[in-house]
Image (spheres, grey):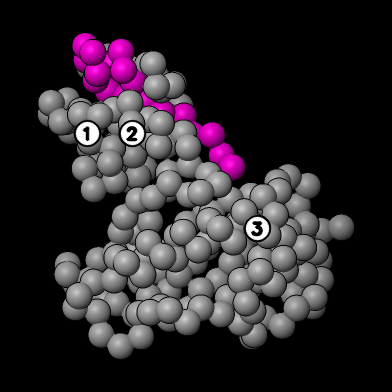
């Protein structure tokens, strides 16, 4: 059966115009995830803010209660005892200038997250133009520029996610896998929504949470009834 046909059948199984309570929405998303692989479940939040205004940016990080279902590869750029601590904490790759050179010369990107210490930012900054477009540039706000590299590595491995507003005032975040089931997905959903509500800019006017949608990798979006904010 072609994916388009599966998609069409999925839409017939529920009302796309209706906003469902969380548990019901999560169940529909799971039931309509028809691919043969364990599909990722994503949360899309449309906010009532202006992303063009610096004082209305919404971004942050949190460790989801049940992780993301994906094991991320971590590269730590550090020296000395910080490099040793990163290695002990479970970093996949640890190094200093040689790692930056490897990325620069060999176009090597076999990692999902880069963590570095403040003193190495001068070195990492040399390849900012390469890392930036890929979303891999370390940033203090996301906790990836820190002296406590061991903690940062452990958080990423535990299911730490970063959320941030895009140009259309929508936040897109993966909150787990189809195999998580309704309960675990609901717990991750609640944790992320609570974080986004707390991150509401003081200058935001009117309705903050405009719409909330859950969707699987290959499946249709299901609206979630959410009243806070």
Disc assigned to residue 146? 1
Location of the C terminus by quadrant is bottom left
- Taking the spot 36% from the left edge, 70% from the top edge, the residue there is 197
Q: Nearer the viewer, residue 222 or 23?
A: 23
Q: Is residue 131 visible?
A: no
- Taking the spot 31% from the left edge, 55% from the top edge, the residue there is 60
Q: Is residue 151 above or below residue 170?
A: above
Q: Residue 72 vs residue 28: left or right?
A: left
Percent position (x, y) of residue 159? 48, 42
Q: Secondary structure at mark 2?
A: helix
Label 1 to label 3: alpha-carbon separation: 33 Å
Looking at the image, tell me whether mark 1 or mark 2 is earlier in sequence order. Answer: 1
Disc 3 crowd, CA 10 A, few/some/many (<14, 14-19, 20+): some
User: Badges 1 and 2: C-beta atoms under 8 Å apart?
Assistant: yes
Disc assigned to residue 152? 2
User: Badges 3 and 2: C-beta atoms under 8 Å apart?
Assistant: no
Percent position (x, y) of residue 121? 16, 30
Looking at the image, tell me whether mark 1 or mark 3 is earlier in sequence order. Answer: 1
- Taking the spot 20% from the left edge, 29% from the top edge, the residue there is 147
Disc assigned to residue 183? 3
The span picked out in magenta is 69-86
Nearer to us: label 3 or label 2: 3
User: Badges 1 and 3: C-beta atoms under 8 Å apart?
Assistant: no
Label 1 to label 2: alpha-carbon separation: 8 Å
Q: Is residue 115 visible?
A: yes
């Amino acid at each position: 059966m072609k994916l388009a046909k599966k998609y069409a059948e999925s839409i017939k199984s529920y009302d796309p115009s209706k906003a469902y309570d969380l548990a019901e929405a999560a169940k529909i998303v799971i039931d309509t995830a028809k691919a043969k692989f364990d599909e990722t479940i994503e949360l899309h939040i449309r906010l009532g803010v202006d992303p063009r205004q610096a004082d209305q940016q919404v971004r942050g990080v949190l460790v989801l209660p049940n992780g993301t279902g994906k094991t991320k590869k971590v590269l730590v750029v550090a020296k000395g005892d910080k490099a040793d601590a990163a290695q002990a904490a479970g970093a996949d790759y640890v190094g200093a200038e040689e790692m930056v050179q490897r990325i620069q010369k060999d176009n090597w990107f076999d990692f999902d997250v880069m963590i570095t210490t403040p003193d190495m930012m001068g070195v990492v900054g040399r390849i900012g133009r390469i890392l930036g477009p890929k979303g891999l540039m370390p940033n203090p706000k996301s906790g990836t520029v820190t002296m406590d590299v061991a903690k940062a590595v452990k958080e990423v491995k535990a299911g730490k996610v970063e959320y941030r507003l895009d140009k259309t005032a929508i936040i897109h975040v993966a909150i787990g896998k189809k195999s998580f089931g309704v309960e675990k997905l609901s717990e991750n959903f609640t944790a992320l929504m609570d974080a986004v509500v707390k991150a509401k800019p003081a200058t935001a006017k009117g309705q903050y949470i405009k719409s909330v949608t859950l969707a699987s990798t290959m499946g249709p979006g299901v609206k979630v009834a959410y009243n806070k904010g």
